[in-house]
Amino acid sequence: MPHPEDLRGQLMRLAELRSAKLHGKPTLRALARAAKRRSPTVPDSWLKGESLPRDSDALLGLIAMIRAEATQSGLLEHDVDAPGLTVKDFLQDRRWQDLFDVVWDARSEAKREAAHHQQAQAVLEARGPRESATAPADPPRPIRSWTARRLGVHPAIRGAAHIPDPANDFSLPCYVERPHDLQLRDLLIQAARPGAGPLLVVVAGTSCTGKTRTAYEALAYLPDTWQLLFPQTPATLQEALEAGAAGPGTVLWLNEAQERLSGPDGESAAAALLRRLDTRQGPFIALATLWPEKEAALRGTTTPRARDLLAQAHRVAVPDSFSRHLDRVHEASGKDGALAIALATGGTAITQTLAAGPDLVHHYENPQDARGHLGNAVISAAVDARRLGATNPIPLAFLQAAAPGYLSAAQRGNADPAAWFHDALSYAQAEVKEVAACLQPVPHPSGMGPSPDVVTVADYLQQHGSWTRGDQLPPASFWKAAAHHLTDPSDQYRLLLSAEGRLLNRQATHIALHIDADLPAGLLRTLVLARDSAGDKDGAEFLARMRASSDVLSDLARARESSGEPADAERLVREAAVHGYVIGLADLSRMRAEAGEWESAERLAREATGLGHNLALDDLARVREEAGEMESAARLYREAPAHRILPSPQRVQDENADTRFVTWNTTPANHLCAYVLLVRGRERAGDAEGAEHVARLVAADGDPFALSALALMRDAGGQAASAEKLAIEAAVHGEPSALLSLAEARARDRAWASAEYLVRQAADHRGWYPFIRLVTSLQEAGKADDAERVAREAAAHRYPFPLADLAGMREKAGQHADAERLAWELARNGDAGTLADLALSRQAAGQPAQARRLAREAAARGYPRALKELALQAEDHHLLAYGLDSDGTPSLPWTVADVISECEGE
C-alpha cells in the first residue's frame, strides 16, 4: 500500500473520503472542470493513484471543490478515516501544496540527474571505451563460465544427483520443465536476435520455488558468445552500467534483485538501469528474480525509480507447487534420487523440499534440548528483525543482545554465561539435510568469503516465520538491541514504523531517539502529538526540536491552541517561523478567525505577511467573506500584498456582491463535448465508419472519451461485439470506463463469462481495481465460489481489495465465520486491515468481546486502527497516550525523559 505521506497515497485517501462520506460528490465531470481538464478520466485517474497532477493549480482546484462539498454537507469537523485528522485539516491547501512540491521536486531532481548523466555519457563516448572508466569491480565474463552455484541456485538434498558439480559436492536435481519455462525461453530467444532492443525480465515466485534455477536453465538458449554480468551490490551495479560494461550481447544477472534495487543506493542503481534500457542498444537482457512481496515493496511509493523500472518488465511467474505436473516429476524421479525423496514426502512443494525448506522449519520449531532452545531464540530474533523491517545483514551483536528476551527465566538461569551464545549460533547455523542453515553467512560484498560478524535468514524460513510470527510482539530486549545495533537509517525507520503501527509507543520513541537521520514529518507528528496528548509537554517539544522539524512544531502549536493554550501556541509558531516555517503563523491566524477572535487573527496574519507569507491576509479575507463580513473582507483583500486567491465566483455573480471584487471565469470551452456530439450524430445518421474515424482522431490527440461514448451507443443498439472492440480500443488509450460499464451490463444480464473477460481487459489498463465490481456482482448473484475465485486471483496479483470487500459483504450478510476466514487469509499475507474492519463491525453489532479479540490481532500485525477506535469509544485515554508494552498489556505511564534516561543507562 502507498506511504501515507505520499501524494499518490493521499489522493487515494481523498477518493475514499469522496466515496464514503460525500457519496461520490462532486461528480468527476465537476472535478474535471475545477481542475481545468477536458476529460473526467483525468481526476478519476488521480483519485485512483494511477497518475499524478502535474499542475498544482489543477490539484488545488480539485481540492477546493471537494472542500466546498464537504462544507455544504457539514463534514468539516468530522474525522477523515482515523481519529485526530479532521476533514477540514485534511483538505487544507497548504497540506496539498506541500505534498505536490515533495513529489515534483524529487522528479525534477531525477531529470537533472538524467541530463547530467547524458552529458557525462557523451564525454565518455568521445573519449573511447578505454578512457571512459576504470574496470568495474564485477566485470562481465563469458556466459558458459558461470556455474549454477555461483549464480545463486539453491543446492538440493542429496540423492542420485543428475548434474554433479565436479569441483565440490554441490548438486542439482534433474530439471523438470513447466509452462513458465517455455514462456521465459521464448522471451530470451527473441531478445537475443540481432537488432533486438534491451529487455528486462522478472522471474517472480515465493521462496524456494525455483526462480533462480528457472533463470539459470534459460541461459542455455542464449548464444555461447554472450557475456554475463553479475554485480554484487547496488554500487557495483551502478558502476558497471555507467562504465558501459552492459553492452550488446550481455545478460545482466539480478538474482534476488531487491538486494540491488532497495534503499537510496538501489534507487540510484535502478535509475542507471533505466537509462541503459532507454538507450535501445541491444541485444541486451536484464534477468531478475524477486519474491512477490519484495516486488510489491519495490513497486511502492517510496522507491519511484525501482517502480518505474519494474513497470517496463516482462513478468514470468513461477508456481508454488508441481500440483499440475506431478506426472513429469514421477517420470524424472526414476533416474534422480533427490526427486524420489521429494515425492516421498507426499506433497507437491517439490522445489521447497529439494532445498530443505520444510526441514529448516522443523529444525527451528522443534528444538530438542537446551542448545536447541537457545538457537530457537536467536533465530526468532533474526526472523523478527527481518519481518519488522531490517533488510541489511543482521549483526551478531544484535542477536546476542535480543535473544535473552525470547527465553524463559529457567532457560536463562540454566545457560552458561560464557558459552550460551556460541551454543545458540552453532544450532542456528547447523546445516539441515547438508544443504542449508537457518542462519546463513553473508557473502563479502567485494572480497572472498563471508562478511564478518553478520548473518542472514534462510529465505524459506523467513517467509514461513513472517506468517507464523505475524501476531507476535517481540520482547523488550529486541527493541533495545535494535536501537543500538541495527544502525542503518532505512532499517531504523522501518522498525520505527513497525513499533508505532503496533501501538508500542515507548519502543517507537526509543528507536526515534537513536535514528541518525531525519524522520518523515507524518511519523514524527504522530509521536509528538501522542506525547502532547499524554501531558508530556516537554517531551513533545523535545522530539520536535530534536529533528528540527518546524512544520511539526507548527502542528504542535495547533494542538495547543485547540486545547486552550494560546500563549504556548503563539510561542511555538514563532519558533517555527524563526526556522523558516511561516505557514504556522498563518494557520494559527485562520484558527483564531474561525473562532471569532478577529483582532488576534489579523495580528498574526500581518506578522506572517511581514515574514514573507503573501497569502496570510488573503486567507483571512476569505474567512471574513464566508462569514458575511464583506467590508472587512474587501479591506483585507486590498491590504494583501498579492491577489492570487480571489473571492469565489458564486459571490462575484451575486447581485449584492461588493463591486470592488474582481470577477473571474473558471469555465473553459469544452471542445470534447462537441466531438462527442459529432460522433453521436454520425452514428445516428448511419455513418458508422465516419463515427469511428472521428472518435479515433480525437483519441490519437489524447482524449479517448468519444471512443467510449461510441462503444456504449453500439452496445445499446445491440452491437455487442463492435461495442467491446471499441471499448478495448478506448482502454488502450487510457479510458477504460466503457469496458467497466459493459462488464457491469453483462453481469446484470448474468453473462458471467463475458463480464469476466471484459473486466480482465480493463484490468490490463487499470490494475486490478475493476475486479472489485465483478466480485460484488458475483456475490450478490449468489455465486459465492466464483466471487472468491476471482477475488483470490486479484490477491495473487498483489491487489487484496476485492477479497477484503468480499469479507465485508459476508460479514454484513451474517456469514461471520466466512468473513473471518477471508480476513485471516489476508492477514497471513501481510494485510490485517480487514481484521480491523471486522472488529469495528462486531463492536457496532454489540459483540465487544469479539471486537476486542480481532482488534488486538490486527494491532499485533501493524494495524492499530480498530484498537484505537475501541479505546476512543471506551474513553480509554491511557491506552491512546501510552500504548502497549512489549507483552501486549497497556503500558504504565512514561515520558520522553524516562526513555532518554534508559538510553543513557544502557
Image (cartoon, rainbow, N blue to C red):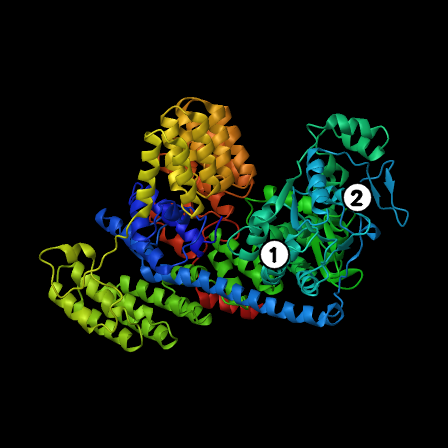
In the image: residue 798, left or right of residue 865? right
Place residue 690 in its image quadrant.
top left
- SS category of the residue bearing label 2: helix
Name the amino acid type tagged 2. Answer: Ala
Rendered residue at 40%/22% (across/down): 749
In the image: residue 304, left or right of residue 223? left
Residue contact at pointers 2 and 1, CB within 8 angstroms: no
Give the distance between the C-alpha atoms of the residues marked 2 and 1, in whole angstroms: 26 Å
Badge count: 2
Count residues near mark 1 (Cα–Cα under 10 Å), then give few for <14, some for 14-19, many for 20+. Answer: few
Give above or below for 751 relative to 203: above
**The label number, if any, that marks residue 537 in the structure image:** none
On the image, the x and y values in percent for residue 511 come to 53, 62
Q: Residue furthest left?
A: 656
Residue bearing the label numbered 2: 220
Give above or below for 459 relative to 772: below
Residue bearing the label numbered 1: 278
- SS category of the residue bearing label 1: helix
On the image, the x and y values in percent for residue 871 come to 37, 47
Disc on the earlier residue, 2 or 1: 2
Q: Residue furthest right?
A: 166
On the image, the x and y values in percent for residue 471 come to 54, 44
The quadrant in which the C terminus is found is: bottom right
Place residue 160 in its image quadrant.
top right
Instruction: Judge whether residue 767 can be spotted in this image.
Output: no
On the image, the x and y values in percent for residue 615 come to 27, 68
